Image (cartoon, helix red, strand yellow):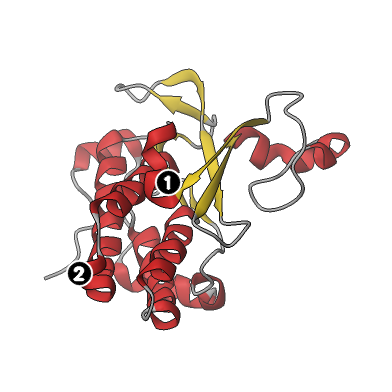
Amino acid sequence: MPEKQIKSRQRVADHGEVFTSEREVKAMCDLVAQECERIDSRFLEPACGDGNFLAEILTRKLTVVSKKYKKSAYDWERYSMLALGSLYGVDILADNCEICRERLFKIWDAEYKKICKKECNDDTRASAKFILGLNIVCGNALSLRCVDKNQEDTDEPIVFSEWSFPRNDAFIYRKDYTFDELVNADEKPEQKDEQMSLFGGDEAPDDEGKFISEYKCHYRRLGENG
C-alpha cells in the first residue's frame, strides 16, 4: 500500500502539510549516518509533522544503545534517555505534536521491553514521556514562538532543554534555553561567551534571560521537579 503523504487537502492548503516518504527519510539519514548513530548527537526538525525523521533517527540511536548496553538495564535506561533527549521537534499543529510524541515513545518502549524485560519500570517510562513532552513543541519555528489552538503566535517563546549525565551517575541534568537565543547566538558575538549553548560550551549566568533554568534529579524522577 502506498504511503500516505497528506492527511487532507485542506491541511495542505492551510499549512502546506506534506509528509516525507519513508524511502526519502532513510536516504537522507544515510547521508549523515554517523551522526544518526551517535547517541548524544542532537537533531532538530523545525517542521516535524508526526515525526518521520525523528522516528528514523531514534530507531538508529536505540540500535546502538542496545548493542552497547544490552547487558545492563541501568546503563540502557540512562543512555536511552540521552538518545530521547537529543531529539527536538517543532510543529504548528497540536495533533502532529501529540502523534509525534506517542510515536517516539512507542519506538523507545518497544526496545525497552525487548532489552530490559522484567527490569522495566513505569518510573523510567514516565521520565521518557516527560522528555518528549518538553522536546516536541507546538510552535512556529519561523517566529520562534509557541502557538495557540488556532495556530496563532503567543507571547511565549519556544524553550528547549539540554539533557546530560555530566557525572556519569544516575542524576540527569536539564538546562532550559529559549529557541531564539540558540538560533541567533552567532549574530551576537559579543554575548557568545556568556552562555552555554544547547550545542556545547560553558555555563554562564542568566544575565539576559538566555539561560532560563537548571534542574537536576534522578533520571527516574524527571516529572517530580517540573
Give the total number of marks visible in the rendering.
2
Q: Which residue is mark 1?
A: 47
Query: Viewer-proximal residue, 151 or 73?
Result: 73
Q: Which mark is residue 212?
A: none
Q: Is residue 18 visible?
A: no
Q: CA distance from mark 1 to mark 2?
A: 37 Å
Query: Viewer-proximal residue, 71 or 93?
Result: 71
Disc nearest the viewer among 1 and 2: 2
Query: Viewer-proximal residue, 124 or 213?
Result: 124
Q: Is residue 43 left or right of residue 13?
A: right
The quadrant where residue 214 appears: top right
The amino acid beneath tag 1 is Ala
Residue under the point 24% across and 50% down = 102
Q: Is residue 204 visible?
A: yes
The amino acid beneath tag 2 is Lys
Q: Is residue 133 left or right of residue 213?
A: left
Under tag 1, what secondary structure? loop
For residue 102, above or below residue 33: above
Q: Which residue is mark 2?
A: 118
Which part of the image, by quadrant, shows the C terminus? Answer: top left
Residue under the point 49% across and 71% down = 36
Residue 129 position within the rendered picture, expressed as x and y whole percent measured from the top left: 32, 47
Under tag 2, what secondary structure? helix
